[in-house]
Amino acid sequence: MAKHSEFNAFVETIAALRAPDGCPWDREQTHASIAKNMIEEAYEAVDAIESGDVAHLREELGDVLLQVVLQSQIAADGAEFTIDDVCRDVNEKMIRRHPHVFGEAKAKSAGDVLELWDAVKLGELGASDTQAESPGRAREGLLDGVPTSFPSLMQAQKISRKAVSVGFEWETIEDVWGKVAEETAELKQAFAAAPKTDKGTVAEEAKAAVELEFGDVLFSLVNVARKMGIDAESALRATCGKFRRRWSFIEGAAWVQGRTVEDLSMGEMQALWDEAKAHE
């Protein structure tokens, strides 16, 4: 088995940057000061994956690893934990959550694996609840492990899946479609009853209530995706990419004519949209 000497060398490099005689910028960083970098680098890695650019993916994964190692070094400097603790914890978790590989459990499909994963996580939650009974420790709820910093769609997926893991679930996908219809009707009713601006949009004083109803529709659609075995976040990203490609086609067609998109009528844009769709 490989010794991963390059990983060890990288850890040493980051430690040197954080050393008293290292880089002034790196020495000044805290967990909070570079937190957003973790999100940015993860998104850039996903972009590389979706574009199929393997060389770029290699670079972006390095940037993600940089965030992990740097955060771990900041923790080590503060006597909180080390990169070895991080690796040990995640290794133990992966072994614990794959009892079908490292234990006696059986799993014949990816769906079976997800059910096992959720069951083990529930057991971990129960154990943490037992520990929380000691003075000074707060009990962790089922949804507390879903970061509120997640994009809303991703957050909805995780919340939905966690609720299902304890039995909060519709029996059939038709039942979920019924919920979509119910929430859609409530949204239409809320919009119809809300005061409007001169442009026909919801007035500011009613916006929060209508937004909440709109959110209910989106959340119910996330449950439809889950029932279908579809990742809602990936689906919406794919649609955004499709829209970008078609819009680019419309812009290009306008430029060839010496015009801008603003010069096109809605009918002309729709015709170009249909042409772009046909080319796909």
Image: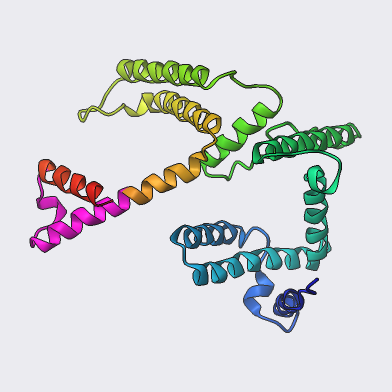
How many numbered marks appear?
Answer: 0
Q: Position of residue 223 (x, y in %)?
A: 53, 29
Outermost front residue: 108
Q: Quadrant of the N terminus?
A: bottom right
Residue 272 vs 212, above or below: the answer is below
Q: Choose between 265 and 139: the one closer to the eye.
A: 265
Return the x and y of residue 153 as percentages of the image width and height: 51, 39
Looking at the image, residue 184 lies above or below residue 93: above
- In the current view of this chain or complex, which residue is farthest to the right? 134
Residue 25 locus on image (x, y percent): 62, 75
**What residue appears at the point 64 percent right and 69 percent down from the top-left corner?**
66
Give the colour scheme shown: rainbow
Check residue 246 for magenta coloring.
yes
State whether the magenta stretch is mostly helix, strand or loop: helix
**Residue plotted at (65% across, 41% down):** 110
The image position of residue 70, as x and y in percent, is 69, 68
Q: Is residue 197 magenta?
A: no
Q: Nearer the viewer, residue 102 or 180?
A: 102
Q: Is residue 95 left or right of residue 230?
A: right
Q: Is residue 150 visible?
A: yes
Image quadrant assignment for residue 185: top left
Depth check, front residue: 61 or 100? 100
47 is higher (above) or lower (below) than 63: above
Residues in magenta? 243-265
Residue 80 seen by the camera: no
